[in-house]
Amino acid sequence: MQRLLYTTLTLLCCAQVFAQAPQGITYQAVARGNAGNVLPDSALTVRMGILLGSPSGDLLWQETHAVNTNIYGLFDLVIGQGDGTGAGALASFADINWGNGTFFLRVDVDPE
């Protein structure tokens, strides 16, 4: 009986963990200038936008991140943990209904 209870509780906990919506999406890129040259050791502002339906679709969520590139121009961030701009249709990243269609990511990078 105790084994059955333990197995049932374990399955319920696993189902709860796997049913969660993403709290963030890991993103990594190499920053390059207009001429295609890598931007090493640079401070950048990265603006991430989640679009619904197509690359020119409705903007659902937009946020900014202040990042620094390494010597190879590489930076990383977590989409969903940036500073919301208020430009999207939703109040927070957590409000995105991921089962509601196809989504696209728009990335804008501005040197500081």
Image (cartoon, rainbow, N blue to C red):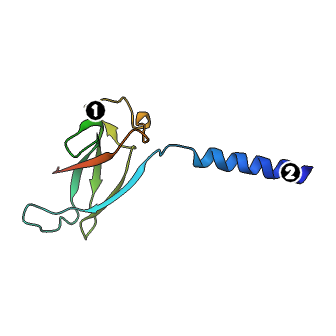
Q: Residues within 10 Å of mark 1 (few under 14, many from 20)?
A: some
Q: Position of residue 16 (x, y in %)?
A: 64, 44
Q: Position of residue 5 (x, y in %)?
A: 85, 47
Q: What is the residue that sits farthest to the right in this orientation?
A: 1
Q: Position of residue 25 (x, y in %)?
A: 41, 51
Q: Is residue 111 above or below residue 59?
A: below
Q: Is residue 95 above or below residue 32?
A: above
Q: 59 left or right of 21?
A: left
Label tally: 2
What kind of residue is marked 1?
Gly
Q: Residue at x 33, y 38 (%)?
A: 83
- Camera-side mark, 2 or 1: 2
Asked whether the residues under the numbered discs 2 and 1 touch, taking CB atoms below 8 Å apart as contact, a structural biologist would say no
Q: Residue at x 17, y 68 (%)?
A: 38
Q: Earlier in the sequence, mark 2 or mark 1?
A: 2
Residue on which disc 2 sits: 4
Q: Secondary structure at mark 2?
A: helix
What kind of residue is marked 2?
Leu
The disc placed on residue 88 is 1
Q: Disc 2 and disc 1: Cα gap in Å?
A: 48 Å
Q: 75 left or right of 36?
A: right
| Image quadrant assignment for residue 82 | top left
Nearer to the camera, 79 or 51 = 51
Q: Residue at x 35, y 53 (%)?
A: 77
Q: Is residue 110 above or below residue 52?
A: below
